[in-house]
Image (cartoon, rainbow, N blue to C red):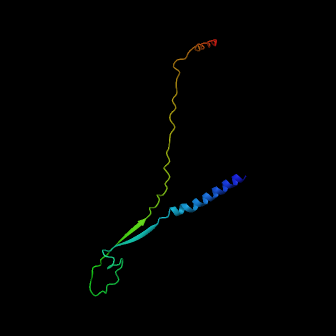
Amino acid sequence: MIGRLLAALSTTIVACVLALALPVAQLQLASIENSCCCPDPDRCRCPDHDESDGRQPAMQACHNTQQAMVTPAFAAFEPPAPVHVTAAPRIATAIVHSFDTPHAPPALRRPAAPS
């Protein structure tokens, strides 16, 4: 009685965990990572360079790159197309030759040898 109760309880717990984990695992997540290349970290700060006064044009020392990482979506399940199978034709066998009498009985066992 207690064994059945524990088995039912553990099965229910596993089913609940899977019911919660499966939809979360199928989420399509995305993250964007900004990276910057500064030749001299003391003189440039990435990614903005807001310190320029705007009076004279200047070339910024840093190049911003952006990488978008997206988890792939699972393929949708498509059931396979039904296959129609026809039964193999039955082959009739004809008896070509039949014996009139049964075969001879097997030979009798030899008597046991003295030990």
Q: Give the number of callouts.
A: 0
Q: Image height check: is 14 above or below 114?
A: below
Of residue 16 and residue 58, the one placed in the foreground of this image is 58
Of residue 88 and residue 65, the one placed in the foreground of this image is 65
55 relative position to 69: left or right: left
- The residue sitting at 69% across, 52% down in the picture is 4
Question: Where residue 47 sits in the image (x, y, percent)?
Answer: 36, 77
- The residue sitting at 57% across, 62% down in the picture is 20
Q: Image height check: is 87 above or below 4?
A: above
Of residue 83 and residue 111, the one placed in the foreground of this image is 111
Question: Where residue 110 sits in the image (x, y, percent)?
Answer: 61, 12
Question: Where residue 2 sits in the image (x, y, percent)?
Answer: 71, 53
Of residue 42 and residue 33, the one placed in the foreground of this image is 42
- The residue sitting at 63% across, 59% down in the picture is 13
Query: Which quarter of the rendered picture does the C terminus lie within?
Result: top right
47 relative position to 24: left or right: left
56 relative position to 4: left or right: left
Question: Where residue 91 sits in the image (x, y, percent)?
Answer: 51, 29
Q: Image height check: is 77 above or below 59?
A: above
